[in-house]
Image: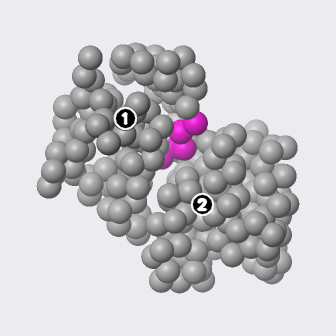
Amino acid sequence: MAKRVLVVDDEKLIVKGIRFSLEQDGMEVDCAYDGEEALEAAKKKEYDVVLLDVMLPKLSGFEVCQQIREFSAMPIIMLTAKGDDMDKILGLEYGADDYITKPFNILEVKARIKAIMRRSGKTTPAHEDPKTVTFGDMKIDCENRRVYINNKEVNLTAKEFDLLELLVFNPNKVYSRENLLNIVWGYDYPGDVRTVDVHIRRLREKIESNPSEPKYIHTKWGVGYFFQNQE
């Protein structure tokens, strides 16, 4: 089944170029040229990746990302202005999985899209890890990549799930921010360790009853993060 991508940018030439290139790789591509159109498309169809520009008419890319996160964990890659670190951090805060800086090389875009599809589409083999694990009020369905707190599903992004899964299956092992960045995002990821901090904070907000006094994901100051089930 063809992978589905939503490309959102108000510059029609950019959209046309990305669409052509992705369709050459056998992907199914839908396009939107403003924030409202993008949001409507995301409500109608579940995409394998959304490529979302920050600067859009009607609704900004940040607003679109935030609203999509209210109903879906579909992977989102933000397109940000060159050298604007604040856009990158804000994109991650609003729930984006990755970002690409403009102007970009189409080969980089395709590589990032394929990498995020591989990660979000992976399942955990039954012979390696149990399909479902429970810790206190949290249940993790590894095969379907879903997480429940008190039997209510919480909406994790692909990267948030990857982080949680890695920490859960290596309890009490402290991972540095650099290690987490390399393992979850890949060694060729151009971002920095702030990406990890933002995702850990968002993850705590979703799974911890009191994020400032976490029960599951702990900080070892000056070293990194680890998972511990305190019951």
Place of residue 126 in the rendered image (x, y in percent of width and height, measured from the top left):
45, 17
Q: Nearer the viewer, residue 182 or 71?
A: 71
Vertical comparison of 201 with 153: above or below: below
Place of residue 39 in the rendered image (x, y in percent of width and height, measured from the top left):
79, 54
Residue at x 78% of width, y 79% of height: 11
Q: Quadrant of the N terminus?
A: top right
Q: Which residue is mark 2?
A: 77
Mark 1, secondary structure of its residue = loop
Crowding around mark 1 (Cα neighbors within 10 Å: few <14, some 14 to 19, many 20+) is: few
> In the image, is residue 64 part of the stretch drawn in magenta?
no
Quarter location, residue 216: top left
**Along the horizontal axis of the image, is 52 left or right of 124?**
right
Residue 6 visible in the displayed image: yes
Magenta-colored span: 155-159
Q: Foreground mark, 1 or 2?
A: 1
Vertical comparison of 13 with 167: above or below: below
Quarter location, residue 136: top left
Residue at x 36% of width, y 55% of height: 196
Crowding around mark 2 (Cα neighbors within 10 Å: few <14, some 14 to 19, many 20+) is: many
Residue 131 visible in the displayed image: no
Residue at x 41% of width, y 55% of height: 198
Mark 2, secondary structure of its residue = strand
Which colour assignment does the render follow? one colour
**Along the horizontal axis of the image, is 119 left or right of 230?**
right
In terms of sequence position, does the residue under pointer 1 or pointer 2 come before the other?
2
**Along the horizontal axis of the image, is 17 left or right of 186?**
right
Q: Which residue is mark 1?
A: 210
Looking at the picture, which amino acid does disc 1 mark?
Asn
